[in-house]
Amino acid sequence: MEDEPVNIREYEEIAKQVLPKMFFDYYNGGADDEYTLRENMEAYKRIMLRPRFLVDVSRIDMSTTLLGYKMHSPIMVAPTGMHKYAHPAGEVATARAAAACNTLMVLSFSSSRKIEDVASSCNAVRFYQLYVYQKREVSATLVRRAEKYGFKAIVLTVDTPRLGRREKDIKNKLITPELSNLEGLVSVDVGSKGGSDLAAFASQTMDPSLCWKDIEWLRSITSLPIILKGIITAEDAVKAVEMGVSGIVVSNHGARQLDYSPATISVLEEVVKAVSGAVPVLIDGGIRRGTDVFKALALGAKAVLVGRPIVYGLAAKGEKGVKSVLKMLQSELELTMALCGTTSVNEITRKHVQTEGDRLRSLL
């Protein structure tokens, strides 16, 4: 019997072995030089933990709430596209695994399974991630479908007026994605003339004119709460609060958009301070360990979203693999909390971590 993976890195290795190179590179790659892709993970390694001892940690409670919905832990499933590249069951398998782990999934606009299929696959709380297309009615139709089938919030991605330059996809000549939710709404037969079909499709569909006033347009077509995904500066965070959004995701799109933008964990505290508790702040990008989750919570995140590790688990073992990845991260977080002397997520504070900035200031 083959050994079970014991960490996310081992799941990544299995995914690399079982997936065609084109699909693994699609999931794993970043923009341009992939500096930010590496930095998203390296920045976590530069944050040290400050444990407190002689605390009764015989019972640990990782539960939290987001927009009133309770989760077993503050670890959510991030919106990542085209899960059928990883496993035939696609997002349905991912949704079932998230439900089994009592956590919240954000379904990608670029899902390879229909909204209706995911909604009927299991009983769970889910959010829907949205891109705004040049043909606004395409986006509006999908928002209405998500609301009709019980999704509880819209997560609007704001960092993609154009698609980042993903050189691995260009070299691999990434094939046209299967986007079931767009059937009858827009053609995905784009003809990339030798490059990435995804890039060609995005260039013909994404709306580069999307701006702050369009938050009002989105609010006019849905009664669901709106969360903005892709905020990495205090200035945009303040503007988001002024626009009345219900939450913010600190995200650089998994380092797939603008290379040399900062690692998300390095700007989390800036965004948290800017919103001053007005809305919950979430974070994605670079999370591979329960210690990473703990660090993000200590710096002010309400919860984290995990993307690539979910796909690694899906590619390796289907629904079972996604469950394993989520439970692995939950178990690691629980252990980290115990070893740091915290019995609930509310007890995790800024004093439990030391950043590079802290160390520099200590020398002054």
Image (cartoon, grey):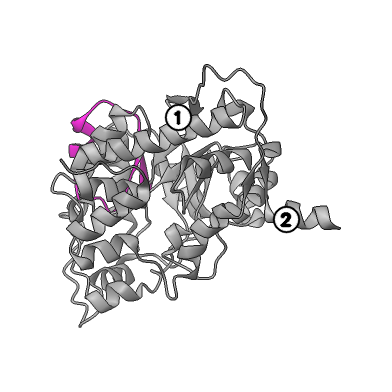
Q: Residue furthest right?
A: 364
Give the side of residue 356 with respect to residue 102, left or right.
right
- Residue at 43% across, 58% down: 254
| Residue 331 falls inside the magenta stretch | no
Front in this rendered view, residue 69 or 214: 69
How packed is label 2: few (under 14 Cα within 10 Å), some, or many (20 or more)? few
State the image coordinates of residue 164 (x, y, percent, origin top left): 41, 70
Q: Is residue 344 visible?
A: yes
- Residue at 26% across, 25% down: 123
Q: Which residue is mark 2?
A: 357
The stretch of residues the image draws in magenta is 106-129
Q: Relative to 205, say whether 233 is above or below.
A: above
Q: Is residue 79 visible?
A: no
Instruction: Identify the secondary structure beneath mark 1.
Output: loop
Q: Which residue is mark 1?
A: 73
Frontmost of labels 1 and 2 is 2
Front in this rendered view, residue 153 or 24: 24
- Residue at 65% across, 21% down: 55
Quarter of the C terminus within the rendering: bottom right
**Residue type, mark 2 in image:** Gly
Mark closer to the chain start, 1 or 2: 1
**Callout count:** 2
How packed is label 1: few (under 14 Cα within 10 Å), some, or many (20 or more)? many
Front in this rendered view, residue 58 or 349: 58
